Amino acid sequence: MGIANGKEISTKQLCDIMEEAYRRGKEVLPQGKVATYIPELGKADPGALGISLCARDGWHFNIGDTNRRFTIQSISKVISLALALELLGMDKVFERVDMEPSGEAFNSLIDLDLISNHPMNPMINSGAITVANMLLGKMSFEEIQDVFRKVCEDPEMESNEAVFRSEMQNLSRNRAIAYLLQSKGILDDRVEETLELYTRLCSLQVTAVSLASMGMTIAMDGKLGNGESVFTGRTMEICKTIMLTCGMYDRSGRFAVKVGLPTKSGVGGGLVSVADNHVGIGIYGPALDDKGNCVAGGPILEYLSRELQIHLF
Ligand code: DON
């Protein structure tokens, strides 16, 4: 099986590697905490962990809680960005959102208000809310959901109403960000509609398996297993670069050094990681580190990256 860069690997070797990665992830779970600022997310099991690896031939190697559904949260920002790039083109998108790492928390508005006047990148909340505003009126939620289903090869994906409502009832911070964006002329007047679309996309439910498929679609430059092209290679190139530089928020630099794979996290506990042309990796672990990233993700991906020789550099 040609997974590792230039190295053949047997199914047995891969299973052993996955088991060790899982063990390393489990070991650090007690250091993490589930998110509670969206009260419904606080019900997650902090001991849950699942890893799914999708190989180029479409095979999935799964270990742990890989069929449990959880909300995609910020991982949706990658697909929203890809859609905006396809619909509006790179210049129009990056007129309104920058492409620089923020070095701030995902829900910060410090840079936006005091330093840059633009969201620093599309992976933080201010940037993704701006991207959702770009999609409004161009695609309905249902049409966008269909794209998510395709990219994740998960035709049953639905949004989780309880999580959606829970976030809508606790939206003060994102509402503050959105109105600040409107005051600066970055959002148009459809602020509440934008917030609803953004929050709905965050509440779509995936599994580690569907995230691994999403990783594979991105790794294959937007092509599905059946050869259908959902996104262009150029769009995927931009998304992967921004995932590498900004996908893990103010832990992106450390992650890029240690793991060396474009990766995006969500506060539901998901992670998607991409090894170009080789594999997509999906992880579920709702125990989060202090930056809001799955706490097990670092040790798991660092180990997989080294063992499979898929670090970018
Ligand atoms: O807007 C929020 O705060 C959440 N719906 C998504 C944040 C998130 O996933 C941050 N990621 N690690």
Image (tube, grey):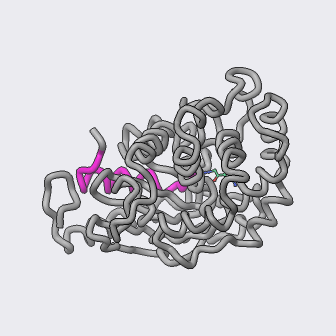
Range shown magenta = 293-311
Residue drawn where x is 84% and y is 38% of the image: 179
Q: Nearer the viewer, residue 21 or 11?
A: 11
Residue 216 in view: no
Kindly give the residue lying farthest to the top in the view shown: 115
Query: Is residue 179 shown above or below 166?
Result: above
Q: Please tell me whether residue 176 is drawn above or below residue 25 in the rendered image.
A: above
Q: Is residue 298 magenta?
A: yes
* Any part of residue 280 in sight: yes
In the picture provided, is 190 more to the left or to the right than 18? Answer: right
User: Is residue 112 depicted above or below 153 in this figure?
Assistant: above
Judge whether residue 164 is colored magenta: no
Instruction: Name the side, left or right, on which 306 lies relative to 246.
Output: left
Classify 180 as above or below 23.
Answer: above
- Residue 44 x %, y %: 65, 70
- Left/right placement of residue 231 relative to residue 134 reads left
Percent x, y of residue 184: 80, 28
Q: Quadrant of residue 198?
A: bottom right
Pick the front one: 158 or 44: 158
Name which residue lies at 63% across and 33% down: 97
Of 136 and 299, the residue lying toward us: 136
Image quadrant occupied by the N terminus: bottom left
Q: Position of residue 155 (x, y in %)?
A: 53, 76
In x, y percent, where is residue 107? 70, 42
Residue at 27% across / 38% down in the picture? 313
